[in-house]
Image (spheres, helix red, strand yellow):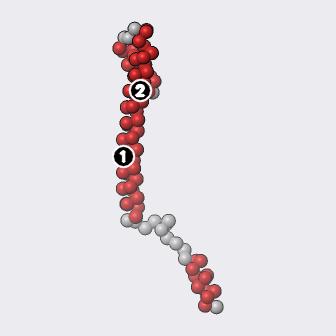
Amino acid sequence: MVTEMANEKVKAAGAPESEKEERLAKALAEEIGTHVKQLGETIAKDQKELVNEEKEQKKHITSEDLHDGFENKVRFHHLIS
C-alpha cells in the first residue's frame, strides 16, 4: 500500500525519468512516516482502551475471580485430624 501510494505521487508529479528514482525514494519515506504516525496513534488509542477495559473488568466479579478453596479445606482438615 505504501509503495503504491508513493508510485502514484511520482506519476502524478510527472517527473522526468532521471528524477523518478529520487522522487520515489522521497515519496516512500513520506508515506512510511505517515504510516508510522498512524500506527503510533492507533497503538496509543488501543492502550487507552485497554486500560479503561481493565478498570471496568475490576468492577465486576467474573468466574476467573472465583476460587474453589478446596486446597485450603484439605489442608485444614489434615491439621484438625
Question: Where 61 sits versus 74, above or below?
Answer: above
Question: Where 2 sits versus 58, above or below?
Answer: above
Counting residues from the N terminus, which is met first, the one under dot 2 or under dot 1?
Answer: 2
Question: Where 53 sits versus 15, above or below?
Answer: below
Q: Secondary structure at mark 1?
A: helix
> Residue 10 shows which numbered tag?
none
Q: Quadrant of residue 51?
A: bottom left
Along the line of sight, the residue nearer the viewer: 10 or 74: 10
Q: Secondary structure at mark 2?
A: helix
Q: Amino acid at mark 2?
A: Ala
In which quadrant is the C terminus drawn? bottom right
Q: Which residue is mark 1?
A: 45
Q: Quadrant of residue 15?
A: top left
Q: Of circles 2 and 1, which is in front?
A: 2
Residue 59 in the image: state x and y as whole percent.
37, 65
Label 2 with label 1: CB-CB less than 8 Å: no
**Whether residue 70 can be seen here:** yes
Q: Which residue is mark 2?
A: 29
Q: Residue at x 42, y 30 (%)?
A: 32
Question: How far apart are the alpha carbons under marks 2 and 1?
Answer: 24 Å
**Whether residue 6 can be seen here:** no
Q: Residue at x 45, y 24 (%)?
A: 3
Q: Residue at x 39, y 31 (%)?
A: 33
Label 2: few (<14), some (14–19) or many (≥20) C-alpha neighbours in 10 Å: some
Q: Residue at x 36, y 41 (%)?
A: 41
Q: Amino acid at mark 1?
A: Lys
Question: What number of labels is visible?
Answer: 2
